[in-house]
Amino acid sequence: MIVKELIPLIEGKLVCGDPDSSHQMKLAFASDLMSDVLTLDSNNPLLITGLCNLQTIRTAEMADIHVIIFARNKKVTEEMIHLATQHNMMLIETPYSIFRISGILYKHGIKPIY
Amino acid sequence: MHFNFEVEGGNFSKAGSASSEIKKILNQLNVDYRIIKRIVVALYEAEVNVVAHAYRGWIDANIDTDKIQLTLTDEGPGIPDIEKAMKPGFSTASAKVREMGFGAGMGLPNIRKNVDEFDLKSEVGKGTKLEFTVFINSE
Ligand SMILES: Nc1ncnc2c1ncn2[C@@H]1O[C@H](COP(=O)(O)OP(=O)(O)O)[C@@H](O)[C@H]1O
Ligand SMILES: [Mg+2]
């Protein structure tokens, strides 16, 4: 799945990154706990989270994550966008809950890590 | 090659900036991305520990062709029982630290999992020293 296909499924808004990106998303992980995200060995999962601060972006940088979906209308800050841009990340805001986003992505073939 | 960074206790907006610099350097040196990931994941959890639990600290990075060594030294409260601190789930983190997505007692165990050599020493009331090494097998 590419970002253009993902956005309409979750009423998402891409607030950082290229809307025409060909980056393929195959795996996802959902957590608000960054220490948990840092234990993953999987290659390039997308992250669904309710934690919206600079450490979310730092964690994604260290864990080689390039797509982050922020659930429940969490607003991404300028500082986060600045850092995310340097690391070629796509940041998506959505009104949906983590549960709803996860269900939709799962139904559309995105695989869980565990 | 040798690099130094300072870490400010309590400053969460800067937490991770040293790990980020070291990641950039390792990328420029064309180190294998799997090795880079192990190092920066360990280093980032360690850097967050200094920010979360200590007053100030210093990171020393020694990059060789066959291994990468990191030393994090801090001035802080120290760790009274290292064996206990190493247990998954043990944490004394504040609410503020948990708001940042840490404080589940997973940091030290994950650091140890990602590195080849691990040494943690601490003196209560003075500070903590964490040293770890990751070997690079050059095929
Ligand atoms: N640099 C440090 N200075 C003082 N205490 C520390 C330090 N690093 C770790 N600790 C102690 O060890 C505990 C476990 O650390 P860790 O596994 O990283 O979990 P967390 O940081 O999420 O609490 C911390 O809660 C803290 O009590
Ligand atoms: Mg920690």
Image (cartoon, rainbow, N blue to C red):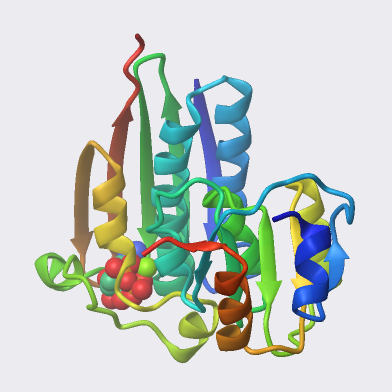
**Which quadrant is the C terminus of chain B positioned in?**
top left
Residue A98 image-quadrant placement: bottom right
Foreground: B119 or A84? Answer: A84
Foreground: B100 or A97? Answer: A97
Residue B117 image-quadrant placement: top left
Task: Tell me if residue A56 comes above or below residue A73 in the rendering.
Answer: above
Foreground: A18 or B114? Answer: A18
Q: Residue, x 30% and y 83% (percent of image)?
A: B92
Q: Residue, x 32% and y 32% (percent of image)?
A: B134
In the image, taking residue A63 as reference, residue A77 lies left or right, namely right
Please provide percent x and percent y for residue A87: 73, 47
Quadrant of the image where one finds ligand 2: bottom left
One can see residue B11 in this view: no
The total number of labels drawn is 0
Q: Residue, x 49% and y 67% (percent of image)?
A: B51
Please provide percent x and percent y for residue B135: 30, 26
